[in-house]
Amino acid sequence: MELTERKKKVLRSVVDLYIRTAEPVGSKAIAELPDMHYSSATIRNEMAELTTMGYLEQPHTSAGRIPAAAGYRLYVDELMADYRLSMDETQSINTAIEEKMQRVDKMLEKVAKLVSQATDLPAISAASRHSGVTAKRFELIFAGEGSVILVVMLSHEQVINKLIKLPVSLQQGDLQVLSAVLNATMTGLAPEEFTPELLTRVMDAAGNAAALVPVIVDFTAETLRSQGSTNMAVAGQMRLLGQPEYRDVDKAQKVMSSLDEEALSNLPAMMQNQNGTKVLVGPENVASELKDTSVVMTKFDIGDGMQGMIGVVGPTRMDYAKVTARLSYFAESLSKMFAKPETPALPEAKEEQ
Amino acid sequence: MELTERKKKVLRSVVDLYIRTAEPVGSKAIAELPDMHYSSATIRNEMAELTTMGYLEQPHTSAGRIPAAAGYRLYVDELMADYRLSMDETQSINTAIEEKMQRVDKMLEKVAKLVSQATDLPAISAASRHSGVTAKRFELIFAGEGSVILVVMLSHEQVINKLIKLPVSLQQGDLQVLSAVLNATMTGLAPEEFTPELLTRVMDAAGNAAALVPVIVDFTAETLRSQGSTNMAVAGQMRLLGQPEYRDVDKAQKVMSSLDEEALSNLPAMMQNQNGTKVLVGPENVASELKDTSVVMTKFDIGDGMQGMIGVVGPTRMDYAKVTARLSYFAESLSKMFAKPETPALPEAKEEQ
DNA sequence: GCTTAGCACTCAAAGTTGCGGAGTGCTAAG
DNA sequence: CTTAGCACTCCGCAACTTTGAGTGCTAAGC
């Protein structure tokens, strides 16, 4: 059986309508659409064929049709009309993003919240290094009796620090020796290279400050590891309750309980080698708990060798056109924002001085 | 009308039973309790009086009674039996807490999750300074052409840093001058004291590095402000769905939408001058959206001049005894954990060296 | 040969009715 | 003061009916 243009048109209309109403769509409703110039009987025949072809489903005899997974898939890939963002929408996204984002993890929380708000669906956001973070430079600062501040500059323009307290008193000189040793031996190493042998080697060379070494090595290795891994945030789970398919609390509960960071952690991974926007329709989903939901996600650029990702989770019947449009715009705006030189106040270097 | 011992006993039984079953409690059910040596008729009379006294309510004639707000209040204050945690419970709380908590905000998220899990209710956690955070010492590190790392030691043993990039090239010497200036003028100041006048004064003294000053001043002031403010985290909102009172999605949605950080931000403030565990029953609640829910909260000690708070939000019919017991135990364990010297690895300073 | 009007048929959703039972308040007796 | 007894109320449930949206099929029309 062939998928004629008219069948496509009918299918598109069915999906569109179902997305709007969340109710099975009948032949009459389709026939009454402005640019549908056939009677309900004709539509009925087309819908019957679309059903045998697997694009539509019938909840029970004498009900309208709803899209099947294959129907959504075709709709997303070929049929759906581009959704054009209104000025209002682009503007509200932009003003939302504009506030300066500070640390990456805070930023992710915020982005997830914003995306969730913009789509009225649960949203996730994640950031991951391209991997290969190393320490670029170590600096030790004397901070009073028994206290030392360790400052580590990482590749990718990040700086971290830790206050270390020891029941040993050290001299400025000792710290200088140690930091020289650290810079000589521990820069440019991957986290796996922080072996016990390295530890003893550094301690041997460290002189009076050897007691500091284990703390420093552990902290650095730990930090590199955590920097290499993926951070993510989830927000707006409750928005699912607004969707008619989750009027049944039991269903809602089942899905929502699988909307946490652990359960969703494979989504960012899926995007690694993808480009553009990806849509997972219902049963294509990875986590089995999400069998009845769809996922839309897309990538953005954080700079500093980091890769960001935002996505939403919603009922299979979601407004793919609108959601993908908003998501893409979001990703674009975020990329732009991070591309801007981060120093906000290019010093208005006052005339005085 | 007087609140006799027998009335109290009846009231306690009604609340206990209602907490367990979430159904209106009838006189017969009470009369059949093991240590209730009166007939249902007598109980009926008592219940009728408790109702006119405002401790109980009747959803409609010929239904059982449910506790009114005043009933819960009396129950919480006087009647409820102590809940003794089982070994299992204390143990699972302890193992949960044991993992080392890193930064304060991550810690809060984790704690909120744990509390939510332990009580099966939405939970919040917050931390706030006692206020009065100031910068203790500034340090500038030269980090290659046009890059400088600013390290600020705060009172209360915290260290923060920022990488600053400028299209101006600076010498080591310039940085030394500037850090001396910063340490001389900007230590010990409250965030309000970072005025434009201060900025110009520091810039005048800063010499070649004056271009850095605005960035540094802004960043420091901003950081002090954010350190002084309250951090909080909310977790487990969806757990409400497990409660029978929220089988109705509309109700659930209304309450859950008010379970975010903003709406709950006055709760931590309420604890500032309170000690022990505080219970807000239904209509006593601050936010009007929470009129039909209760809040239980308690404080814990983070050390470093910080004050922590954990709490849960749940249906007015919640198991106050169990919840307060678990919450208190949690707070206690957390306080203990933070009291321990934080440096985990008192260097096992190997013999070599 | 495609399109469409017409019709009999199906089935979920919504409304109707009628019980059974849990619970109450009151009264009168112990 | 306590309790057995009784009439009364009202919710919840289940069985039944009605309604109407929607279908598939057939036969007539362009």
Image: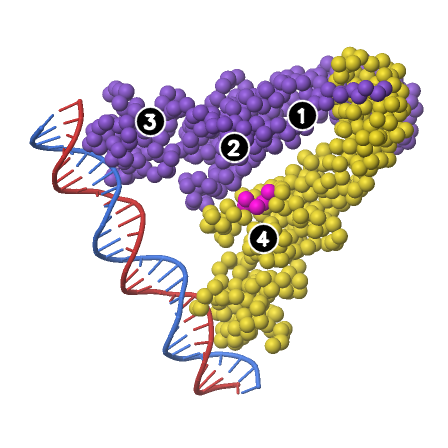
Chain colours: A yellow, B purple, C blue, D red
Within 10 Å of the Cα at label 1, are there few (<14), some (14-19), or many (20+) other Cα atoms? some
Disc 1: which chain? B
Residue at which label 3 appears: B12
Mark nearer the viewer, 3 or 2: 2
Circles 1 and 2 in contact, beta carbons < 8 Å = no
Residue A256: percent from left, percent from top: 54, 45
- Report the residue marked by disc 1: B226
Q: Amino acid at mark 4?
A: Ser
**Quarter of the rendering occupied by the C terminus of chain B:** top right
Residue B164 vertical placement versus B239 (above, below): above
Q: Residues within 10 Å of mark 3 (few under 14, many from 20)?
A: many
Q: CA distance from mark 4 to mark 3?
A: 45 Å
* Residue located at (54% from left, 48% from top): A255
CA–CA distance between discs 1 and 3?
A: 46 Å
- Determine which quarter of the picture holds residue A292: bottom right
State how far apart marks 3 and 2 are (Cα): 25 Å
A12 to A41, vertically: above or below: above
- For the residues labelled 1 and 2, the Cα–Cα distance comes to 30 Å
What amino acid is at disc 3? Arg
Residue position for label 2:
B118
| Badge 1 or badge 3: first in the primary sequence | 3
